[in-house]
Amino acid sequence: MCELLGMSANVPTDICFSFTGFLHRGGGTGPHRDGWGIAFYEEGGYREFRDPHPSVHSPIARLITDYPIKSNIVISHIRQANVGQVRLANTHPFVREMWGSPWCYAHNGQLEGWQGLPLGFYRPVGDTDSEHAFCWLLGELRRCFPERPENDALRQGLWRLLHQLCERLRGLGVFNLLLADGDYLYTFCSTKLAHITRRAPFGRASLSDAELTVNFAEHTTTHDIVSVIATEPLTDNEAWERMCPGELLVWRDGMIEARFGRRQA
Amino acid sequence: MCELLGMSANVPTDICFSFTGFLHRGGGTGPHRDGWGIAFYEEGGYREFRDPHPSVHSPIARLITDYPIKSNIVISHIRQANVGQVRLANTHPFVREMWGSPWCYAHNGQLEGWQGLPLGFYRPVGDTDSEHAFCWLLGELRRCFPERPENDALRQGLWRLLHQLCERLRGLGVFNLLLADGDYLYTFCSTKLAHITRRAPFGRASLSDAELTVNFAEHTTTHDIVSVIATEPLTDNEAWERMCPGELLVWRDGMIEARFGRRQA
């Protein structure tokens, strides 16, 4: 299995603190030694860093923890290979352009019968179930929405379709997902995803995986809203909320803008 | 104007030496302060590093010079903005997936009337003439070749079409190009591109832009063939060959596999 880390914020925010804990799981406190990657959306642009080596020994990962890249949406992944060998082409996150936006995708889980998912315009570069599922998913979205949905009703339709496609993939095995398009971050839970939203009054947080505490009050303004989503909670002194299986959350500016498939309590 | 740097090699080779000279032009010995990027093809995979800041001050660029990434094809670009503001989305190289391969593109020059080039499936994320031309070019290739050309005759047809499309872009202004698909590196000259092929017996080379000399004999085997292509020669003690305007070279494993549009001497 792999681990996922995502962020949605209403101001450009660096993820150095969370990433420091997360990357320790890549061959340090966790078994995820088969590569890692991180993608940043900044001012409408996109960049990513990927390495097929364990994050805990990676000089590129060290650069990311030391060089604060301020971003509104981040997606990161550390890999423990199941389908597809350990190589760069199989390293998440994956990205494709749709409607003039870079769509970024990372998956935790394993699928059965994924080879049967029909592909259209988007084709995998590597040989993982994850990238195949991404190409299928994006192809299906684009088949139904050839152009970018430009109003609320169309966007709701897009998100409902995304939820249906995620549910179909969940039917093939384990499918925990982080997906983003630069405006929205989408998180879908199949078995394990937790989230926390930090806003004023900000407090202290301590990492579970490394000796590090931060006082967010020193790094934020009262208007900041920053949400972090991860396979497992990254801090041990805060209350993280766990997502329900089958639930899709649509995040914008650090807040949940829409929910689909929430189990009734 | 911007500057281009490319490499094609028959063994995974690091570009640290050439990149060290090249990045000095990004705000050091040259005026190209508006961002830089570098893309590597490794074992069928692809990764890139991009930064909208001057390469000479960039910690990411410093990492690239210190951390040898071994690759068969490299494309790098340093930018002096003309069309499109200085921001990540306008920073070369650009990449799109076609036929399951990442196609990487960097452009030096400036085009007129590029807004009229019709777009199909590929759409620009930023607002440069360069990325628009890339999306048009790739869209045209894919329109004529919906599937990957799998034999020599089809590949020759693809390359002839690529040459025609490049000539059409040259008709709109200055269009020096580096393009790659993981197997081949394509270089098209509109005004300025020079190349050098290094093979046994290897000698010494001295950078023009920095105090650095390397003895390639210490870093290579007798079978290695490594070609470097750049806007301006990067060394001052070797004989670089300049490309002709209108010429397209197709590189594979460090060697020229095909030429199109060479001016008769």
Image (cartoon, coloured by chain):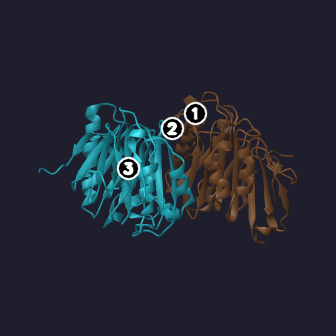
Chain colours: A brown, B cyan
Name the subunit of mark 3: B
Q: Nearer the viewer, residue A194 or B106?
A: B106
Q: Quadrant of residue B221?
A: top left
Q: Is residue B83 left or right of residue B111?
A: right
Residue type (three-letter) at the residue carrying disc 2: Pro
Residue type (three-letter) at the residue carrying disc 1: Thr
Residue type (three-letter) at the residue carrying disc 3: Gly
Q: Nearer the viewer, residue B192 or B169?
A: B192
Residue at 43%, 55% (x, y): give it. Answer: B212
Task: Label 2: state its secondary structure.
Answer: loop
Q: Nearer the viewer, residue A19 or A42?
A: A19
Q: Quadrant of residue A86?
A: top right
Distance from Cα at disc 1 to Cα at disc 3: 30 Å
Q: Are marks 2 and 3 in contact (CB under 8 Å)?
A: no
Looking at the rendered image, the disc whose residue lies closer to the viewer, 1 or 3, is 3
Q: Is residue B153 left or right of residue A158?
A: left
x, y percent for residue A156: 64, 55
Q: Nearer the viewer, residue A146 or B218?
A: B218
Name the subunit of mark 1: A
User: Which residue is labeled 2 in the image?
Assistant: A124
Kindly tell me whether residue A148 is visible in this rendering: no
The correct choice, above or below, for A231 with respect to A225 in the image is above
User: Which residue is labeled 3 in the image?
Assistant: B6
Q: Are marks 1 and 2 in contact (CB under 8 Å)?
A: yes
